[in-house]
Image (tube, rainbow, N blue to C red):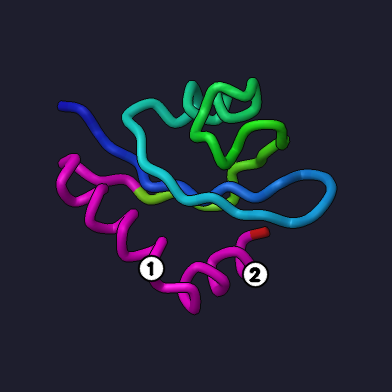
């Protein structure tokens, strides 16, 4: 059974940015972001994983990703707590 992950990234250097996404392969996805092959927003920055959640279905993961992207208060809480 495939697991899906919702993750929060934070930039390592420079101005602090965060990014929320979902994937089936967390290790590979982080590698792609850091190689400039991830989402357009993440290109040109170095990222570290600060938080992740595991889900059994893509639908659950997408729903949670959408919720976290739209809810700035919870997003900031996760960033402050785990970085």
Q: Which mark is residue 50?
A: none
Quick check: 29 left or right of 35?
left
Residue 49 image point, x, y percent: 59, 43
In the foreground, 64 or 3: 64
Q: Which residue is mark 1?
A: 70
On screen, residue 75 above or below 21: below
Residue 4 image point, x, y percent: 28, 37
Of the image marks 1 and 2, the number of the one nearer the N terminus: 1
Q: Quadrant of residue 68?
A: bottom left
Q: In the structure shown, which secondary structural element does the residue marked by tag 2 occupy? A: helix
- Pair 1/2: label in front: 1
Q: Is residue 79 magenta?
A: yes
Magenta highlight range: 54-82
In the foreground, 47 or 38: 38
Q: In the structure shown, which secondary structural element does the residue marked by tag 1 occupy? A: helix
Residue 62 image point, x, y percent: 25, 49
Quick check: 24 left or right of 12?
left
On screen, residue 44 above or below 74: above
Quick check: 57 left or right of 32?
left
Q: Is residue 80 magenta?
A: yes
* Mark 2 crowd level (few <14, some 14–19, many ≥20, 10 Å Cα): few
Q: Which residue is mark 2?
A: 80
* Mark 1 crowd level (few <14, some 14–19, many ≥20, 10 Å Cα): few
Residue 67 image point, x, y percent: 31, 65
The residue positioned 65% from the left and 27% from the top of the image is 34
Q: Residue furthest front?
A: 40
Quick check: 11 left or right of 27?
right
């Amino acid at each position: 059974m495939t697991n899906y992950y919702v993750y929060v990234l934070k930039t390592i250097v420079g101005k602090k940015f965060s990014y929320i996404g979902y994937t089936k392969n967390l290790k590979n996805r982080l590698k792609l972001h850091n190689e400039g092959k991830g989402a357009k927003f993440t290109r040109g920055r170095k990222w570290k994983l600060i938080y992740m959640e595991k889900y059994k279905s893509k639908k659950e993961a997408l729903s949670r990703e959408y919720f976290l992207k739209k809810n700035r208060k919870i997003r900031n809480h996760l960033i402050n707590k785990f970085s």
